[in-house]
Image (spheres, rainbow, N blue to C red):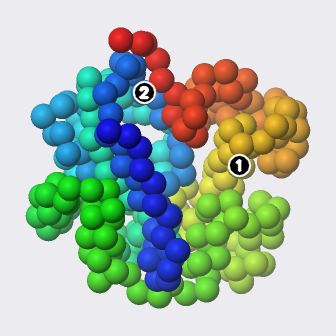
Amino acid sequence: MGTHFYIPEEKPLKDGVQFFWQVKRNNSFRQENIVPKGVVEIVFNFLPEKTFIGKLYNKSFKMPKCFIQGYHYNTIELALPQSQFLFGVVLHTAATKHILQIPAGEFAGKCIDLTEVDTSFNTLWHQLAEKKSFDEKVAHFSLWLLKRLPCLTLREQALNDMFTLKNEMPLSVSNISEWLCYSPRHLSRMFYELTGMNTEQTLLYLKYLKAINLIHYSGLSLTQIAYACEFSDQSHFIKVFKSFTELTPNEYKNRKSEIACHYFEAVR
């Protein structure tokens, strides 16, 4: 039982993977809500007989035993079974195309059964299920990834830094275009391929993600967070935040759990 994380430290794996995670637990809550996290994520469900029924964009879905999800634009609602055993890897956005031969933007707003995209994932699921520890799963999946992951270009690495909020550059079209040496039109095409959104939408999304991060890990007031995230004013901050989460920043702050972008409801 418990939760595990591992962040790769060596290239080229750390250029392709943000982190591996595992959650094996009995659930004391009936519902988990996941607001947009800004990640591309592969998830393996090792208790497929324990049915996860989710709701996304007003449609119900059943969690496959192996799936990928890209950038989401609204909250996922999960009806939690009494127990769960999930293992996942969060990919760097710009590395996804190299690993899966499909750009990350194709997975935006979706939870896609990977066994239907590539039948080798069914074999990989069984191989990982046989590994007894989290470390063994990480080692096996790392080898699988390294066979598919080239060294990323400096531009791809810079993009990954931006998408993971490691770059403090002001989030404007002109700044990003100049920094990457892209025309605004080329930048919009590139962002759409990576996130499923155009430039303006992507930059608002990144401001929202920065706000989520500051709500969890800083002592700043919501007014200070709005300013730090480059929103024009408090009402703009609230409008953008609510468009992604259906909550105001204050409502989210009051409901948040220890896990960023996750909150739980309905105690069993």
> Can residue 252 be seen?
yes
Identify which amino acid the numbered label 2 is placed on.
Glu
Q: Position of residue 96 (x, y in %)?
A: 41, 69
Residue 225, horizontal then vertical, whole percent: 82, 40
Task: Sort mark 1 into few (<14), some (14-19) or many (20+) by Cα contacts within 10 Å.
Answer: some
Q: Mark 2 and mark 1 in contact (Cβ < 8 Å)?
A: no
Q: Toward which corner of the image does residue 177 lie, by quadrant?
A: bottom right
Say which residue appears at 47% left-offset and 88% top-offset: 151
Query: Which quadrant of the figure has residue 244?
Result: top right
The amino acid sitting under disc 1 is Lys
Q: Nearer the viewer, residue 49 or 116?
A: 49
Q: Residue at position x 43%, y 13% from top?
A: 266
Residue behind mark 2: 32
Picture coordinates of residue 155 (x, y %)?
61, 82
Query: What is the C-alpha distance between the residues marked 1 and 2?
Result: 22 Å
Residue at (72% x, 37% y) in the render: 215
What SS does tag 2 mark?
A: strand
Check disc 1 and report the residue beneath it: 210
- Quadrant that contains the C terminus: top left
Residue closer to the observer: 61 or 138: 138
For the residue carrying disc 2, how many other residues have a C-alpha within 10 Å: few (<14), some (14-19), or many (20+)? some
